[in-house]
Image (tube, helix red, strand yellow):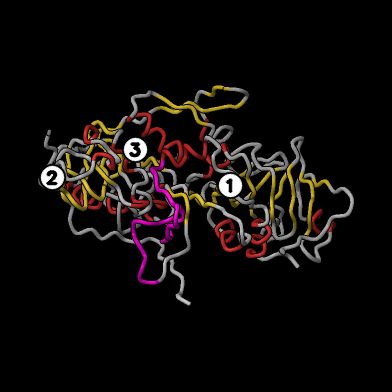
Amino acid sequence: MAFSKEEIAQRIAKEIKDGYYVNLGIGIPTLVANYIPKGINVVLQSENGLLGMGPFPFEGEEDADLINAGKQTITTLPGSSIFDSAMSFGMIRAQKVDLTILGAMEVSENGDIANWKIPGKMVKGMGGAMDLVASAKNIIVAMQHINKAGESKLLPKCTLPLTGVRCIKKIVTELAVLDILPEGGFKLLERAPGISVDFIQQSTAGRLIVEGEIPEMRLD
Amino acid sequence: MINKVVSGAEEAIKDISDGATLMLGGFGLCGIPENCINALVNKQVKNLTCISNNAGVDDFGIGLMLKQRQVKKMISSYVGENAEFERQLLSGELEVDLIPQGTLATRCLAAGYGMPAIFTPAGVGTEVAEGKEVRNFDGKDYLMEYAFDADFAIVKAWKGDTAGNLIFRSTSRNFNPVMAMAGKITIAEVEELVEAGELDPDYIHTPGIYVHRIFQGKDYEKRIEQRTVRIKS
């Protein structure tokens, strides 16, 4: 069975280590916050200017002045801090943020990512994505391996306008966990339960590298 | 102490005329200068270039100015949530410069710090880099991006004093302090205007030297774009 969005988020959460400052993008990445392993201390950065993002407020306690980068009402936590947008991207550019998790429409086998524009159709803008991918020391992409028509989104070369070049090293999809090797190519690390290597091969348009037995993804 | 107080939004924006370049603070609808936007809508100034992270929604914020076709060019990082904006953009009525959010913030910062340009890796190898100078430092490529040159910066603060010192509240701070530093003329509207001396100098976010006009704002709606809550269990 292919993983649900929640399960992709749950798998990514296992990559988060104690003491990490983490920036979560919009979509599946936001769900990762629900699965951060118990007993570790992690600080979530919201690029509009907050470190220490807490859960959604209780009904009636929403504060119009306190939102995250997805414009959702949120809360602070003991130890939170607030700063302006320039400082927020300063700490991103200076690689103070340990891990960035974001979504993608396409990723190429050399680590290019496209996630901000579909020419003539969707023109919403890149927001902070270009800054994040250009500067982050560790990026995990949460994305769908194939689109609704069954076409691969893991490509030899991106077809959409790029967000960043040669910056992605790890991808978690509904089918698999993959690393992008420095010399290029998607190295298959894990597969979703019951998904065959053959199916992942068929679903990956870019160069897939399979070495030895590929274990199933575990969520515990 | 130099007194920066003006009577209200109308007086604050009185010399903003057609073709001006404006910076407008806020992230989404959070911390936007509601009073000045309404005054600009009423004044019907046109051909504006607006530098703002977002473009409001259809019926609030900068969206109100878009609806009246007051904006010639928008410089933003993210403009979703605004159908009229997308329509004007796709039809070519509106000129739009989409730039990375950190680049936007830092180009404001550069203006306020008196630096002509910055180097950032954001956008290297993408269409954002087209026509821009690339410099390599320690093996990594960076784009040269110029400091903004805005006629007016319009910001919203939580508290301010008659000397123009500003304090922002929570994440409504966002772009407001960096834009406040970057305008040739900076206008600040505040939820609470107090006498000079009432704010602790240690807690000022924006020193009054950057602020030319300040006024007590009124009737803040502070609309929430995405109301998300959890249920008490």
Q: Which residue is mark 2?
A: B195
The chain letter under disc 1 is A
Q: Position of residue B173 (x, y in %)?
A: 34, 47
Amino acid residing under circle 2? Glu
Q: Position of residue B197 (x, y in %)?
A: 16, 41
In whole angstroms, how far apart are the C-alphas of marks 3 and 1? 24 Å
| Magenta residue span | A59-85
Q: Amino acid at mark 3?
A: Val
Q: Which amino acid type is shown beneath numbered disc 1?
A: Thr
Numbered circle sitting on residue B6: none
Quadrant hosting residue A135: top right
Task: From the image, state whether disc 2 or disc 1 is nearer to you.
Answer: 2
**Seen in the image, is A99 located left or right of residue B24?**
right
Q: Nearer the viewer, residue B166 or B44?
A: B166
Which residue is label 1 attached to?
Answer: A100
Number of residues whose C-alpha sits closer than 10 Å to that of mark 1, classed few (under 14), some (14–19) or many (20 or more): many
